[in-house]
Amino acid sequence: MRILLVEDEKAIADFIARGLEAEGHAVTWVADGIDGEALARTGRFDLILLDLMLPGKDGLEVLASLRREDGSTPVILLTAKGEVADRVAGLDAGANDYVTKPFAFEELVARIRAQLRSPAQGSATELRTGDIELDLLRRRVKRGDVEVLLSAREFDLLAYMMRHPGQVLSREQLLNGVWGYDYDPGTNIVGVYIAYLRRKLAMEGRPDPIETLRSVGYRLRDGR
Ligand code: CA
């Protein structure tokens, strides 16, 4: 895969580039936002790793500029610990996922793999994540062999999450993606429906499939 790495800290960039090249990826590294934006917009990359704090142009601006013309190339943000608000803004601006520095290389590789395999699942009428199966045409859900009965909204929420397995989804993304119109951003309706879903999907001896990332959002575990 061709990966664009936009990161101004050389030590981190070296660590990532060496590791990804060892995995067989071709990595193009640039250290500032202006070059990053120009290369991102060429459409030559399968995936983009984007730092937020960059010289020239910051990561959020680069992302917004890219998303105006290209909604599909996966973007993973490389964020620092304190940047929770930026992380949420990044997800809302169209980032697919993020990793928090310092991160283990394995975590980054897992996030990249999750991105590179999700497009194929985007158009299927049956989705599968871990032990959960969802049939979009018949609107039926099973966990293992057990049928799970969901309300229309719960079904839509689960389907949205299953289209983005292993990705962190912010409350606002879920609100826009599932409810589809501008709710009061202060509403807790997403949290309420996540709780309903958890209760209905709960199964003795099996883990909770939905992970809560405090003040960031939710992630459906992809069971790998
Ligand atoms: Ca930086």
Image: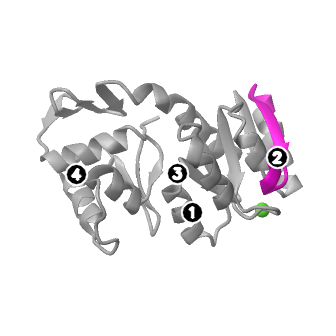
Q: What residue type is labelled 4?
A: Leu
What residue is rendered at 53% in x and 56% in y?
Answer: 93
Q: Is mark 1 on a helix, strand or loop?
A: helix
Ligand 1 under 8 Å from disc 4 Cβ: no
Q: How crowded is mark 1: few (under 14 residues within 10 Å), some or many (20 or more)?
A: many
Marks 2/3: CA–CA distance: 26 Å
Residue beneath disc 2: 15
Going from the N terminus, do you reach mark 4 or mark 2 first?
A: 2
Instruction: Compare marks 2 and 1 and give the one earlier in the sequence.
Output: 2
Identify the element where label 4 is drawn: helix
| Mark 2 nearby-residue class (10 Å; few <14, some 14–19, many ≥20) | few
Type of amino acid at the residue the image marks with label 3: Gly
Residue at which label 3 appears = 94
Relative placement, left or right, of 189 versus 114 is left
Dot label at residue 28: none
- Which residue is painted at 71% across and 59% down in the image? 102
User: In the displayed image of the protein, which residue is found farthest to the front?
Assistant: 69
**Residues marked 1 and 4 touching at CB (< 8 Å):** no
Q: Earlier in the sequence, mark 1 or mark 3?
A: 1
Mark 2 vs mark 3, foreground winner is 3
Q: Does the magenta stretch include residue 180?
A: no
Sequence-earlier tag: 4 or 3: 3
Ligand 1 positioned in quadrant: bottom right
Magenta-tinted stretch: 21-35
Amino acid type at circle 1 is Arg
In front: label 2 or label 1: 1
Q: Kindly identify which numbered label has been placed on residue 197.
A: 4
Residue under circle 1?
87
Separation of marks 4 and 3 at Cα, in angstroms: 25 Å
The residue depicted at 34 percent of the width and 46 percent of the height is: 209
Q: Percent from the top left, x then y, of residue 149?
A: 11, 41
